[in-house]
Each structure stands twice: as structure tokens, then as C-alpha cells.
Amino acid sequence: MSIKNAYLAGVYEGLAKRNAEQKEFLQAVDEVLESLEPVIEARPELEKNGLIERIVEPERVVMFRVPWVDDNGKVQVNRGYRVQFNSAIGPYKGGLRFHSSVNLSVIKFLGFEQVFKNSLTGLPMGGGKGGSDFDPHGKSDAEVMRFCQSFMTELYRHIGPDCDVPAGDIGVGGREIGYLFGQYKRITNSFVGVLTGKGIPYGGSLARTEATGYGLCYYTDEMLKANGKSFDGAKVVVSGSGNVATYANQKATQLGGKVIAMSDSNGYIVDENGIDYKVIKEIKEVKRARIKTYLDYVPSAKYVEGSSGIWTVPCDIALPCATQNELDLDGAKALVANGCYAVAEGANMPSTPDAVAYLQANKVLFAPAKASNAGGVATSGLEMSQNSQRLSWTFDEVDGKLQGIMKNIYANTAAAAEAYGMKGNLVAGANIAGFNKVADAMLAQGIV
Ligand code: NDP
């Protein structure tokens, strides 16, 4: 624990005792509480109202059995989760993750982060997160459908367009959202905007698929410009090759950068001529194959087994877009040694605390996930608005609003850091700006 303020340290210690095994959750809380020290000193009413004790405790946690039948007729059982963390500023909102590593700690860390991220977007959305330890890799479409239907058969009673609106995350893309939506509609006999990331023919928003990756680059662009730099001519390394990574590649390239390395959980590819995001899309979305397949398209590229080595590829800008804690201290040291000047998080909490500290100490511009990857949920918020109005906006309209939102998030996070004496520290700025709005709403609503 790195928290010095006595009130915050006491809350953290109590939380750590009650949730000793939840290391990802505790890591996320530690980082936020550390940033809040100057806020707690400036606002004594927060301690009096037990604001921190309340904000670190989810409003509700649902855990459930998900039984389904595989293609061989065998019954399989997974565990499902929905953590409804905070509804002070709007309905719970946050994705569903299907991955074998999912457990309560991972979902609570993601739900906790989501509260502040959603607040930063300026849209009326509370925070939540859910998922399952089901792994869609290697499953047939029919198996994925049966799993999604079983998952929704329990989840539907806990969600709703004015209560909790899930979306995608790792392992949950357009296919899964479609199956989940179909089952919700069938059970409830209502066609409502209960999920975001839907397909365009049934209420999805144009630009939602691209939004997290695009938003990441819009935020990064603002950060670079404020420091006299830009994507133009920069060598960019993007980890992952899923939704966020693919569209981060596309936008970084459009802004003048050259994406020279990408990865999946098996290894990474390096192509000094620049990786075309359309090839990655085909490998991952159409063929559902491994990133190694890139060599079939570009034989001159290099493939290296093991994903963590990607940070040793010399670059100017690094965009970790795969998963939590994928960029550790060794990775950060390699980036600094090779002259990398900016790291912007596309994934949630991809950098370990010691990696963040090392990057910041070495004057690397650092954009924290809460702010830099908020474009996905912001556009989900825009999808909710379109569903409520029963209208759909054009791609350019949504993309334009996304750009405006990301510029605002940059301005607000930079301003909050400066106002609390930590100019340039966007980690602190994002935590403080996101927190203050939620805290004000909680104070106004009484002890609930
Ligand atoms: P996807 O499932 O589309 O992609 C995840 C990618 O990360 C896959 O290429 C996967 O490879 C790779 N990966 C997983 N673990 C590792 C690892 N240890 N090393 C290298 N690569 C790895 O997920 P998303 O792109 O949607 O999500 C990525 C991150 O972004 C997550 O942290 C998510 O929470 C966050 N995020 C996503 C948003 C969205 O709108 N989708 C919004 C905000 C945040 P493999 O196929 O081998 O598993």
C-alpha cells in the first residue's frame, strides 16, 4: 500500500482484510485512493459522510451458475458475474468479459474503474461490470450461442435500459452481444436498449466498434500536442489484436503513425513497413486464427513466441491494448531504454504500479486507461441516447461527438492534476476528476 493519509489508509486496510484474495481489485483501489489524498484534505465532509467506505463497496454483486451443453452433448458449468458498483450518476454501465481468468476480483476491479471512467465521459452513466470464466476460444458458434442464452437467462432479471446496460469486453464482441440481446428480447418480450455494442440492423450505433481504439488515439493526440509532439512519423507498438488494438492501429495510422508490432496471448509480430489493420481484422474476426498467421500475408514480417517481449521493440509510442498487468517494470525499462516518449493505455490497468511509477519518473507521457480508453463506453452512452430517441446518427456524427468527448476528458484530467498540484500527472487527474463528480452526486443523495 502506498497511501499516507490516515483516513484513506484505514479504509484501505479494512478493505484489504475483507477481500484479502482480491489482488486486482485491491491494486485498482490503492491507485485511486493514493491520488485522492489532496482531495480528502481539501474536503473534510467526505470523511464525515463515509464517502470512501461507501465508494469502494459495490452496491450489489450477483454471482450465478451458467449451465450449457457442448457439441458432444456434455453438460458444462461456468460461473457468471455482474457487479453493480455505483449508480450515483446514472444506470450501471460496463462490459461483460468472457475469459478463463475471470473471477470476482477481476470483475470488481473493472467495475470500480468503470465508475470513474464513466464519470469522466460527462454522460449520465454509473459503473458496473460482469462476465464469466467461459472461454469462447475454440468453441463453435452453436456452443457460444447456447452459453450466451444460458448466461442471459439468469442475467436478464438484474438488468434493464434504466437500471443496468452491459456491453462487450474481452471475449464478448458483436457475435456474443447478438446472442445475448436475442435471448433478452425473447424472455422479456421487449425490444429495448438493454445492451450496447449491438449490430447496426438492431439498434447498434455506427462507430461503436471503432470507438475505444479511436478514442484512445484522440486522447493520446491531445496529450502529445500539449507536449509539442504528435503521431506524425512516430513508430507505434500496439499490444493485443482484438477490438481495441485493431482500431487503435487504424486511427494511429490515419494520424500519421506507423504501427510496427502487435500481439496476441501467444506471441507478437513485427513489421517495420507498418501493419495493416485490415489484415489483423481478417485474421482475428473472420478466420479467428492466431496472430502468427500474419506471416502468411506478409512473409517478410517477424513472429516472436511469447507476448511480453513486445515492449522490447523500439518505438516512440506504446499503446497497451490487451489485458491487465501486461506491461510490467521490465517492459517499462525496455521502453525507456529505447527512447519511447509516450504510453497510453487502451486496455484496463495494463500497466503494473511499478511500471507506471518508472515511466512517470523517466518523463514518459502517460495516459491512464480510465481516461484514455473511455471512448468505448462514451459511445455506448451515445448508443443508449439513440435507442431512447429511436434514431440513429451517422458515423461522422458519432465520431465527431467522440472526438469532442475525448478532447474534453483530456482537458478535464489535465486541469484536475494541475488544480491539485500535480501538473502533468494524468493518473491523478483522471482519478480526481472522475471521483469528484460521483462524490458530489453521492453526497446529494444522502446515506444510500
Ligand atoms: P478482445 O477480446 O477483442 O481482444 C483482446 C486481445 O488481447 C486479443 O488479441 C487477445 O489475444 C489479447 N490478449 C489477451 N491476453 C493477452 C496477453 N497476456 N498478452 C498479449 N495479448 C493478450 O478484447 P478488447 O479489445 O475488447 O479488450 C482489450 C482490453 O481493452 C481489455 O482490457 C478491455 O477491458 C479493455 N477495454 C475494452 C473496451 C471495448 O470497447 N472493447 C472498452 C474499454 C476497455 P488472444 O486471442 O490470444 O486471447
Image: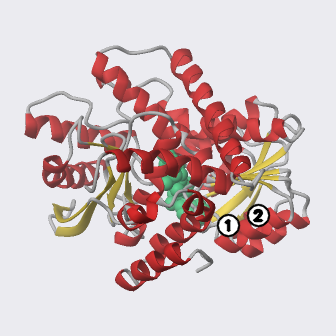
| SS for callout 1 | loop
Q: Position of residue 173 (x, y in %)?
A: 41, 44
- Amino acid type assigned to the residue bearing label 1 in the image: Leu
Left/right placement of residue 31 relative to residue 447 reads: right
Is residue 189 placed above or below 259 in the rendered structure? above
Residue found 41% across the figure and 32% down from its top? 381
For the C terminus, give its image quadrant: bottom left
Q: Total number of numbered labels?
A: 2
Label 2, secondary structure: give it.
helix
Give the residue number, with chain letter if any, for mark 1: 327
Mark found first going from the N terminus, 2 or 1: 2
- Circle number at residue 233: none
How packed mark 1 is, by other alpha carbons closer than 10 Å (few <14, some 14-19, many 20 or more), is: many
Query: Residue 198: x and y, percent?
Result: 35, 33
Q: Which residue is mark 2?
A: 311
Residue 265 shows in the view: no
Nearest the viewer among 123 and 435 is 435
**Residue located 61% across and 55% down the image:** 240
